Image (spheres, rainbow, N blue to C red):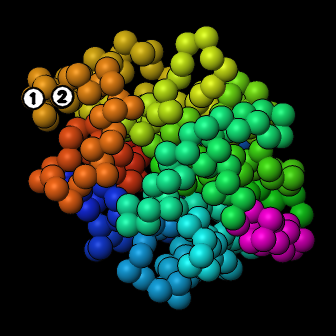
C-alpha cells in the first residue's frame, strides 16, 4: 500500500518526522543481501536505515530496539562521543544469508561542525585521488577507531558476507568514501541526495570496488548539484547509476540532463512561481538559504524541499509497491 508523503516543512527537511514508523512492513519485503545487481527492496531498506541515522530524540537503546525489530541481531553506534560530529550506526544480521549495514547520518542543522564539514570543499589529494576535504576528514573521525573494528567483528563471524554502505546527504558522501577504504570482499553502496565527493579517479576507485553503486536523486534535489561540476577541471563528479525520482514520483534510470531540467523547472515553477526558475541555474548560491530556515516560513523552496530525507524512503516504497 502507498504511504503518505511527509509534510512539506523545514523541520522534515532536516530531521525525520517524529511519528515515523521505521521499517514498517519490512517483514513482507525482506532485504536481499545476495542481490547481484540493483534491488528495490534493498533500496528501500537502506533508505530507511539512512533516515534512522538522523534521529536525535531517541536514546541509542530505542534505536537498537528498532533495528532488532527489523531482525538485526547486533548493532553498534558510531560517534557516540559528543566530541565527534560524525554519527551513524552499524547493524548486522546473522543466519543463512548474513549481511551488514553501515549507515551514516546526514547534516545535523543544529551542529555547526556538520555545516563546516559541508562547506570545506577544498580538493584534498589522498589515496591517489581527490576527495572533498571536509567529507574525508569527517569520515576519519570514526573510520579506524569505530567502523573498522565493528566490521572486523562482523566479518570474523561471517567471512565474505556483504556489507552495504548507505546514507543521505552528508551521510551519503561519507558512505561513498567509505567504500574506497573498505577491505572486505563484498560490498554495495546505495545513497540518497548525495553531493559530489571526488574526482574521476575517485569514481573509478568506488566503481572498481563494487558494481552495486546506486544513487537516488529526488527531482534535482539541490544538494545533488553541489559542489558544482566544473568544466575542464578534474573534480567534482558523481558516482554510480543514477535513479532519478521525477516530480510525479516515477523513478527513471540515468535520464538525460534535458529531461531533468524540464522536470525540475516545471516542478519549481508550480511550487514556487517563476521566480524560482533562476535557482535551478544557480544551485550553489541558492542552497545557502537552507541555513536561514528559522527565519523562513514553510514550505521550503521546491529544490530544497526535495532533499527531505523521508521523501526518499516514501517515494521508493510507493514506486516499488505499485509495480
Crowding around mark 2 (Cα neighbors within 10 Å: few <14, some 14 to 19, many 20+) is some
Within the magenta stretch, is there residue 153?
yes
Q: What's the magenta bit mostly, secondary-structure-wise?
A: helix
Crowding around mark 1 (Cα neighbors within 10 Å: few <14, some 14 to 19, many 20+) is some
Q: Nearer the viewer, residue 183 or 162?
A: 183
Q: Is residue 187 left or right of residue 89?
A: right
Q: Secondary structure at mark 1?
A: loop
Q: Nearer the viewer, residue 19 or 323?
A: 19
Residue 124 visible (yes or no): yes
Q: Residue at x 11, y 23 (%)?
A: 274
| Residue 248 figure quarter | top left
Whether residues under marks 1 and 2 lie with C-beta atoms below 8 angstroms apart, the answer is yes
In the image, the segment drawn in magenta is 142-157
Quadrant of the drawing holding the C terminus: top left
Q: Residue at x 72, y 59 (%)?
A: 140
User: On screen, 166 above or below 238?
Assistant: below
Q: Is residue 283 left or right of residue 10?
A: right
| Residue 239 figure quarter | top right
Q: Position of residue 74 (x, y in %)?
A: 68, 79
Q: Position of residue 242 (x, y in %)?
A: 52, 30
User: On screen, 173 above or below 198?
Assistant: below
Quadrant of the drawing holding the N terminus: bottom left
Q: Residue at x 70, y 66 (%)?
A: 142
Residue of label 2: 276
Query: Disc 1 to disc 2, how far (Cα)?
Result: 6 Å
Q: Nearer the viewer, residue 115 or 244?
A: 115
Within the magenta stretch, is there residue 80?
no
Residue of label 1: 273
Q: Is residue 259 left or right of residue 275?
A: right
Q: Position of residue 285 (x, y in %)?
A: 34, 32
Which dot marks residue 242?
none
Q: Residue at x 36, y 36 (%)?
A: 222
Amino acid at each position: 500500500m502507498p504511504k503518505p508523503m511527509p509534510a512539506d516543512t523545514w523541520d522534515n527537511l532536516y530531521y525525520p518526522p517524529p511519528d515515523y514508523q521505521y521499517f514498517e512492513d519490512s517483514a513482507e519485503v525482506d532485504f536481499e543481501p545476495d542481490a547481484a545487481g540493483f534491488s528495490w527492496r534493498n533500496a528501500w531498506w537502506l533508505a530507511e536505515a539512512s533516515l534512522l541515522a538522523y534521529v536525535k530524540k531517541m536514546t541509542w537503546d530505542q534505536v537498537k530496539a528498532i533495528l532488532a525489530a527489523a531482525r538485526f541481531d547486533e548493532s553498534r553506534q558510531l560517534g557516540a562521543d559528543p566530541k565527534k560530529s560524525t554519527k551513524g550506526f552499524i547493524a548486522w544480521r546473522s543466519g543463512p544469508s548474513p549481511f551488514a549495514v553501515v549507515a551514516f547520518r546526514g547534516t545535523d542543522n543544529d551542529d555547526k561542525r556538520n555545516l563546516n564539514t559541508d562547506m570545506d570543499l577544498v580538493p584534498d589529494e589522498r589515496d591517489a585521488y581527490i576527495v572533498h576535504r571536509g567529507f574525508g576528514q569527517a569520515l576519519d573521525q570514526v573510520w579506524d577507531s569505530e567502523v573498522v573494528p565493528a566490521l572486523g567483528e562482523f566479518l570474523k563471524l561471517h567471512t565474505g558476507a556483504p556489507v552495504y554502505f548507505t546514507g543521505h546527504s552528508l551521510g551519503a558522501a561519507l558512505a561513498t568514501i567509505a567504500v574506497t577504504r573498505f577491505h572486505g570482499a563484498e560490498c554495495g553502496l546505495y545513497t540518497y541526495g548525495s553531493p559530489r565527493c571526488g574526482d574521476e579517479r575517485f569514481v573509478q576507485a568506488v566503481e572498481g570496488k563494487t558494481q552495486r553503486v546506486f544513487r537516488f536523486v529526488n527531482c534535482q534535489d539541490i544538494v545533488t548539484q553541489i559542489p558544482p561540476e566544473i568544466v575542464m577541471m578534474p573534480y567534482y563528479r558523481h558516482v554510480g547509476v543514477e535513479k532519478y525520482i521525477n516530480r510525479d514520483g516515477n523513478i527513471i534510470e540515468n535520464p538525460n540532463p534535458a529531461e531533468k531540467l524540464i522536470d525540475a523547472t516545471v516542478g519549481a515553477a508550480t511550487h514556487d512561481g517563476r521566480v524560482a526558475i533562476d535557482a535551478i541555474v544557480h544551485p550553489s548560491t541558492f542552497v545557502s538559504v537552507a541555513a536561514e530556515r528559522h527565519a523562513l516560513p514553510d514550505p521550503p523552496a521546491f529544490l530544497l524541499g526535495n532533499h527531505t530525507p523521508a521523501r526518499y524512503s516514501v517515494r521508493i516504497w510507493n514506486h516499488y509497491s505499485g509495480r
